[in-house]
Amino acid sequence: MVTPACALVEIDGDELGRANHLQIAFLAQLLCQGVAGGFTALDPATGHMPARHIGMTHQKHPARVVKGGGTNTQRHAAGEQKPDMDQPRHQQCAPVAQLRRRHAVFDSRLRAALPAVMAHIMFRLAHISDIHLGPLPRVSPAELASKRITGYLNWQRNRRKHLFGNTLEQLLDGMRAEAPDHVAITGDLVNLATRTEIEAARLWLETHFDPANATFVPGNHDAYVPGAFARSTEAWEPWIASDNPASQGKLFPNCRRRGPVALIGLSTANATLPFMATGDFGHKQAIAAGKLLDQAHDDGLFRVLMIHHPPVRGATRWHKRMRGTGHFSKMLKLHGAELVLHGHTHLDTLHYLAGRHGDVPVVGIASASQGPDSHRPTAGFNMFEIDGDRDTWKLVHRRMKLSGDGAGLCQTSTGQIKSAAIS
Ligand SMILES: [Fe+2]
């Protein structure tokens, strides 16, 4: 029997989706072998088997992946007894939800460390926004002697009634059950950006998110008054900091690479006058972000832009708009991106902007703390499944929402949304 140097056996996509949390280390081993020794296709016509490890789904139990040692020419010499194929070496998957929880942290860390050659493994990205952690802590008269007085009154009149209860906890439970590889948080962790709120938000981040698996960009409420931006970004730095040396210590724009994905963080957060909630995206940030986009594209990564304000003209009211949508549009046309995530409007929206290679989806989401019985949509999160590589990206979007009756989460929309690299 001829034994090729190495063979990569592809597992059916559906089964891989369920089983790869368990088998990812094995798949990594296969690929490393492939890189070292060169890939050789398994030819079913000839029946030739590889000498090294192979992986395949179990015929009777497709949720299992069989790990086999391939063919050993010495052990399988002519006339020798055949191996017992009814007793393959296998590992059985636990129930899917349990499996996902158990392996989520390991899986995410491993994926973060994977080289580009592993980019074809599906990456699952969750997106939440506008947490507006409550209830509001005690605010001193000195702290209220600023723009905060308007925000304080707004909280007492409106937000306190709706951003309340266990909505956020329910949402996080539902999101954790999805076992995303990474969570993108697009701003407004706090309300008035007092020192107490900022510290409470840091503890909340620490409690719920490993900085390796979650990325944050600030919103206008995180920079509510002069000085707040510096304080909040310093406190939440582990969830913000770039891992790209090209950023040279600057907070924004930044780039965090996780598996096949480049998360490029932008900031529009500025302290504004009372009754204003605008954001700013300037020329300098657009130029710097363009370089990061090009670099990520050259490295074959799926590029996700994270920004608080919607970079779409007319997406919100005049006093809440982003200034600099022209810079943003020009940046997309010059450099492209595969996905833009934003918050700020507290709405479930999907827009498209023209990119270098085609239209780029721009996705917003309701506030993660929005309870029922409001004119605003109830809390939800976006789930994205990113698959493929530079020329064949597939982006599947699901929107998960808390049902108005408090019965839990429901999926309100799903589908492959168009991406620049898909067109
Ligand atoms: Fe908000």
Image (tube, helix red, strand yellow):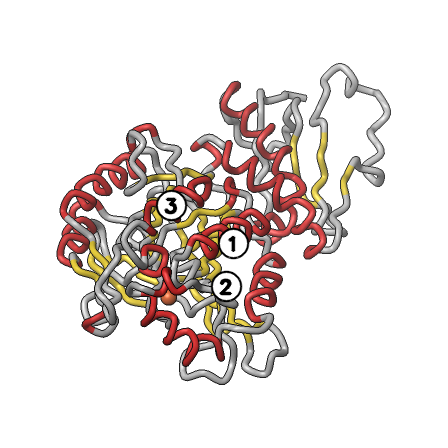
Measured Cα–Cα span from mark 2 to mark 1: 9 Å
Q: Is residue 330 visible?
A: yes
Camera-near label (3 vs 1) is: 1
Camera-near label (2 vs 1) is: 2
Amino acid at circle 2:
Pro
- Name which residue lies at 49% across and 63% down: 133
- Disc 1, SS: helix
The 10 Å Cα crowd at callout 3, few under 14, some 14 to 19, many 20 or more, is many
Q: Position of residue 185 (x, y in %)?
A: 43, 55
Measured Cα–Cα span from mark 3 to mark 1: 14 Å
**Residues marked 2 and 1 touching at CB (< 8 Å):** yes
Residue located beneath label 3 in the image: 233
- Name which residue lies at 60% across and 56% down: 176
Residue extending farthest front? 141
The quadrant of the picture occupied by the N terminus is: top right
**Residues marked 3 and 1 touching at CB (< 8 Å):** no
Residue located beneath label 2 in the image: 137
Q: Nearer the viewer, residue 187 or 382?
A: 187
Q: Position of residue 28 (x, y in %)?
A: 57, 31
From the viewer's perspective, is residue 41 above or below residue 142?
A: above
Residue located beneath label 1 in the image: 200
Which of pointers 3 and 1 lies earlier in the amino acid sequence?
A: 1
Which quadrant of the view contains residue 240? top left
Q: Position of residue 280 (x, y in %)?
A: 20, 55
The quadrant of the picture occupied by the C terminus is: bottom left
Image quarter for ligand 1 equals bottom left
